[in-house]
């Protein structure tokens, strides 16, 4: 009499993709046999589900539709380098019971080891090749993880001084501590400044602002270190808190310091990427704001009564306007970009459910209106630009007439 869990999700898995456990029992020949599966989210029982064998004694349970509703991505500042991440991940676990007999009663059970999910939604092919160790910062991880982005590694990333630049990493494990290493280089590829210090990675998914302004605010730099900066690199490090003090670190992310003078006011868009991390991109060419206006009115019979007579006059109105509403849009244009960057941008931005325009130091929510994307190629398109249309989510409503 035994239940065996034959398959579990990866230790960290994206919540919108399948979160599958497969299990079996040696008692499926018993009368009225079924599996009773208890789903626990963040340690609390969420629901109990009755399932029947699907392939011989084997059965599966997919928790994605239940779990994904618990997760969200925010743009609220917390402290230090950290931005709000507590809703981006959750722990999940199942308990599988055998149920049989007349009447059926619960018999043996088996509990899964426990997994974590995050607010991710990978395309099918990407999910098939997904390996959580590529994005998991832990001293026991045998490989160096990357930050949670699909930005082409061969292409430069550029950032301004003040605008937040977000990166994300999977972490959250006891018996280890985390550090952030900053290295600033000049145009000769010489290190002009370096600093390493402790940081808090308190969540399952951790989202950090690594912009130069953030470094200054947190006391890692005071401003003058950036005077000769051509690019800088940020590396996260995890170290066990006991012997033998094992260490693992991320691949460094390199950001080129933007000192350009622009003909047009640059616009920066932020959005939630496929991993649930907020990503960013600058639109440096001409942008244009527009407004669509809707009128709401009604029709009346012209004329008016006066001393028993019904008078018509040229000042009479037949159509009246009750009110107007207005909806603002902005059209953004990139600079000339490489095909790999354009292919990444349209796939990530256009398919994202959340986006913000960074205006005056605040995140203004927008809706990206582009309905289709095309992976451009220099062989066909020559020099490549991309045009994005975004609707401002705040609408205007006039007075009543």
Image (cartoon, grey):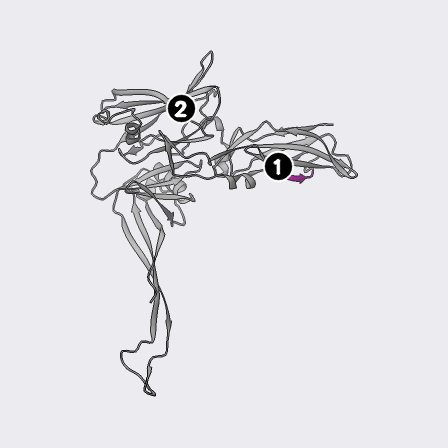
- Tag count in the figure? 2
* Image quarter hosting the C terminus: bottom left
Looking at the image, is 295 positioned above or below residue 9?
below
Compare residues 397 and 3 and report the one nearer the observer: 397
**First of labels 2, 1 by sequence position:** 1
Q: Which residue is mark 1?
A: 61
Judged left or right of residue 76, residue 95 is right
Q: In the image, what residue occupies the spot 34% across and 79% down?
A: 302
Magenta residues (range): 45-52
**Residue furthest bottom as drawn:** 308
**Residue furthest top as drawn:** 244
Looking at the image, is 181 positioned above or below residue 83?
above
Neighbor class of circle 2 (other Cα within 10 Å; few <14, some 14-19, many 20+) is many
Judged left or right of residue 17, residue 38 is right
Q: Horizontal and vertical percent for residue 21?
A: 60, 33
Majority secondary structure of magenta residues: strand
Q: Secondary structure at mark 2?
A: loop
Q: Which residue is mark 2?
A: 250
* Image quarter hosting the N terminus: top right
Q: Horizontal and vertical percent for residue 176?
A: 45, 19
Q: Horizontal and vertical percent for residue 315?
A: 27, 78
Q: Mark 2 to mark 1: distance in Å?
A: 34 Å
Compare residues 183 and 305 and report the one nearer the observer: 305
Q: Secondary structure at mark 1?
A: strand
């Amino acid at each position: 009499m035994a239940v065996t869990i034959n398959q579990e999700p990866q230790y960290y898995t994206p919540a919108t993709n399948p979160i599958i456990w497969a299990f079996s029992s040696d008692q499926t020949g018993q009368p009225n046999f079924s599996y009773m599966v208890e789903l626990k989210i963040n340690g609390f029982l969420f629901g109990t589900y009755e399932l029947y064998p699907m392939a011989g004694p084997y059965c599966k349970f997919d928790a994605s539709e239940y779990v994904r509703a618990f997760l969200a991505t925010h743009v609220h500042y917390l402290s230090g380098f950290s931005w709000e991440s507590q809703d981006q991940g959750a722990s999940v676990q199942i308990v599988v019971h055998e149920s049989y007999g007349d009447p059926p009663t619960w018999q043996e059970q088996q509990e899964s080891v426990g997994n974590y999910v995050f607010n991710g939604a990978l395309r099918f092919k990407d999910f098939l090749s997904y390996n959580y160790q590529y994005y998991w910062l832990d001293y026991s991880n045998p490989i160096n993880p990357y930050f949670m982005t699909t930005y082409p590694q061969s292409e430069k990333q550029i950032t301004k001084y003040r605008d937040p630049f977000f990166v994300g990493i999977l972490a959250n494990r006891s018996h280890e501590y985390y550090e952030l290493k900053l290295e600033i280089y000049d145009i000769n590829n010489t290190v002009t400044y370096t600093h390493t210090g402790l940081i808090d990675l308190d969540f399952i998914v951790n989202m950090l602002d690594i912009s130069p302004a953030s470094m200054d605010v947190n006391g890692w730099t005071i401003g003058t270190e950036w005077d000769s900066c051509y690019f800088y690199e940020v590396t996260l490090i995890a170290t066990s808190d006991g012997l033998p003090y094992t260490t693992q670190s991320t691949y460094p992310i390199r950001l080129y310091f933007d000192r350009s003078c622009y003909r047009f006011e640059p616009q920066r868009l932020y959005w939630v990427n496929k991993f649930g991390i907020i990503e960013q991109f600058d639109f440096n060419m001409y942008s244009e704001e527009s407004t669509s206006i809707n009128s709401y009115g009604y029709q009346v019979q012209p004329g008016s009564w006066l001393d028993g007579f019904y008078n018509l006059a040229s000042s009479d109105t037949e159509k009246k306007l009750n009110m107007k509403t207005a909806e603002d849009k902005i059209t953004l244009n990139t600079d000339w970009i490489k095909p790999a960057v354009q292919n990444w941008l349209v796939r990530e931005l256009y398919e994202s459910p959340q986006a913000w325009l960074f205006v005056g130091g605040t995140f203004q929510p927008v809706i990206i209106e582009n309905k289709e994307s095309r992976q451009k190629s220099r062989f066909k398109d020559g020099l490549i630009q991309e045009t994005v249309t975004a609707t401002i989510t705040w609408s205007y409503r006039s007075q009543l007439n």
